[in-house]
Amino acid sequence: MRSVGVEEELLLVDSDSGTAMPLGVQVVDRATSLRPGQPVEHEFKQEQVETASSPCAELAELRADLAERRAIARQSARAHGVDIAAIATNPGKLRPHATPDERYRRMVAEFGLLAREQLTCGQHIHVSVDSRAEGVAVLDRIRSWLPVLLALSVNSPFWQQQDTGYGSFRNVLWGRWPSAGPTELFGDEAGYDAAVQDHLDSGAALDDGMIYFDARLSANYPTVEIRVADVCTDIRDAVLLAALARGLVDTAQRQVADGEPPARAGVPQLRAATWRAARWGIGGNLVHPSTGKQQPAWVVVEELLGRITPSLRASGDLAEVEADLGRIRQAGTGADRQRAVYADAGDLDAVVADAVRRTHAY
């Protein structure tokens, strides 16, 4: 069975006011003293930290690992009078602070306001592959389905004290990076490496770490790294997305073995599909990967589920995935929850407070 791991970017927020606080350096140092081995890591902005699970074979194992790392991050944050919230944008007005690191200073100097404003939190899913060649073949075959993962994860409707009208405004903000978003077909390892080198040669990326494709080969692990999703407040949503991602990767490799070519959708179609997923989540239409036409979101989600059912059944994940999709269909996404809390309380601080509580409701 393929292993799967999850990286979560988390906001550091004042427990009373909901304001994001620039204490990332202190929180990471505290976490390292509590548990050596970098259980919590620095991120681009001091108002956030990142955790990364171990590679896991079973979803229950992944769920427990994520819960443990959130708990360590929270314990470390509380030692400095703040808490963590797994939401993808900061709802309040804020001017974020870059982490004091030479690489991050270069990013701010090179990319200006884009980098200075950037404070978003995503979920990055790593699924194991046997080789770089397999990884590239997988990337070519999963790319048209990634907007569906985004639609299920949307968790960032508020930014700078306003409802943006988007389910995932994080995706819009992140998409301003010149190396971010969907990609053309790579074809093979040489094609992938050429695309990366084009970004480096042009200065659109300063290094391999700034290759912000929606899905890429990991620079550090033998994995495909899927980066399209918002961080999820509900840990069940995070595990669901990991299961769907693993199912997509496994299904793609079976297509490779069967000689099935990848869909030839171009970047304009994929960008349109990603925009629609970010705008409406599962509350409207999505672009069907096979036709390029709009279909009701749950029709497309069910098509994805049917496509990867053999892989989910083989891994033992099918029943849990079906149950969690049913839960989201009934209760809504993280963005739906944030808007419901705001409608009830009329206060963005209440939105953050609710997210803090649910971040730790394992």
Image (tube, rainbow, N blue to C red):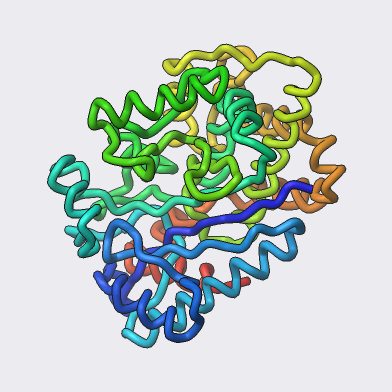
User: Image quadrant of residue 199?
Assistant: top left
Q: Residue at x 73, y 30 (%)?
A: 253
Q: Position of residue 284 (x, y in %)?
A: 53, 31
Labels in figure, total: 0
Measuring from the top left, give residue 35's x and y in whole percent. Answer: 50, 82
The quarter of the rendered structure image containing the C terminus is bottom right
93 or 52: nearer the eye? 52
Residue 194 drawn above or below residue 92: above
Question: Can you say whether 264 is above or below 285 in the image?
Answer: above
Question: In this picture, is 240 found above or below 184?
Answer: below
Which residue appears at 58% of the width and 39% of the height?
149
- Give the image quarter of residue 27: bottom left
The residue under the point 50% across, 74% down is 37
In the image, 198 versus 247, the foreground residue is 198
Res. 351 visible in picture: no
Q: Locate residue 145: give its quadrant.
A: top right
Can the viewer see residue 211 in this picture?
Answer: yes
- 91 relative position to 97: left or right: right
Using residue 112 as the reference point, say whether residue 230 is left or right of it: right
Give the percent coordinates (x, y) of residue 71. Answer: 53, 77
Residue visible at 78% across and 53% down in the picture: 320
